[in-house]
Amino acid sequence: MVTSIKHLLSKNDACLLLSLIYSSLSCAIEEDLINLINDLKWLFPHEFAACVLLHRSEALIDVSHSINVSYPPEWCSLYVSSGFDKSDPVVQEMARTGQGVQYWTDTYKKYDAKAFVSCARDFGLREGYSHGVRTRNGDKRSFFSFAGSSLDKHPRTELILAHVVPHLDQALKRIVGVGKEKAAGLGVELSSRETEVLKWAKDGKNTWEISVILSISINTVKFHLRNIMEKLDVVSRTQAVAVALQDGLLRTE
């Protein structure tokens, strides 16, 4: 992960990315999250952005738990009134796969949705990226989209999204109040070894590097990571770091 960042991001961009991740921990209201997402324009250009929650079972957008950062209001109204969430290829793919980075053009090729795509492009939504995050047992998954008249596919953009979206996910859920009751009753505790493993994961070390640093086998590192993700109800180490920082299980320094 460190090597990828080093090759794809300049030192200044890497520092900005870390600053945005750190700022996400203090997002308390909708305006905070909107400002944070707008600041991502310094890392990759986009004209439109939005973050929503999807119901796991029906793959429907939960409008009450959605924040429109800069999508055209007319498109949002048309989208909801026309039930486009049922024909939007990106939403359908997110419902099927659960999470991950999607480049819209790639996803469109998998579905017969020419009418929807044509309509979206009428509003300037020609190219875009979406990234979803889900929990193991949660009934909702977050969904962040960034679009523009021209947004090229690039590994650098995908790297940025992969690192920042899990933290935006935690901010979104905190702001709209999803999972507060569950979190309050969990009382999650990590063992000292699990904390060590997650701390090094936060610092960008891969599984092999963590095994060398802690003088344990790769399989033992994987065992601890699986336990951590199970305890935190997440599906990736990046998401685990985001949740652990949010819940005070890891320090930011």
Image: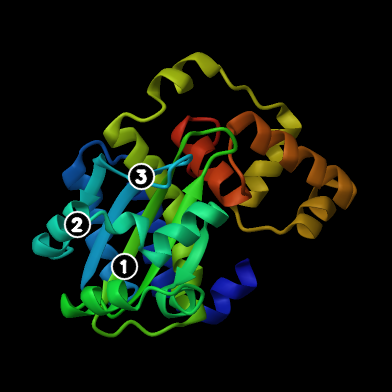
Where does label 2 land, which residue?
A: 69
Q: Point out residue 84 in the picture as x, y percentages from the top left corner.
A: 28, 59
Q: What kind of residue is marked 3?
A: Leu
Of discs 3 and 1, which sits in the foreground?
Answer: 3
Relative to 95, does residue 162 appear above or below in the rendering?
below
Q: Point out residue 220 in the picture as x, y percentages from the top left corner.
A: 86, 43
Q: What kind of residue is marked 2?
A: Val
Badge 2: how crowded within 10 Å, few (<14), some, or many (20+)?
A: many
Name the residue: 49% across, 65% down: 101
Residue 53, labelled with which disc? 3
Residue 195 visible in the displayed image: no
Marks 2/1: CA distance?
10 Å
Q: What kind of residue is marked 1?
A: Phe
Name the residue: 39% across, 23% down: 180
Residue 147, picture quadrant: bottom left
Relative to 67, does residue 44 appear above or below in the rendering?
below
Residue 151, picture quadrant: bottom left
Secondary structure state at the residue bearing disc 3: strand
Marks 3/2: CA distance?
14 Å
Relative to 99, does residue 137 appear above or below in the rendering?
above
Q: Point out residue 117 in the picture as x, y percentages from the top left corner.
A: 30, 76
Residue at the left extreme of this rendering:
74
Question: Which numbered disc flags the more N-terminal residue, 3 or 2?
Answer: 3
Question: Which numbered disc flags the more N-terminal residue, 2 or 1?
Answer: 2
Badge 1: how crowded within 10 Å, few (<14), some, or many (20+)?
A: many
Where does label 1 land, which residue?
A: 146
Residue 37 visible in the displayed image: yes
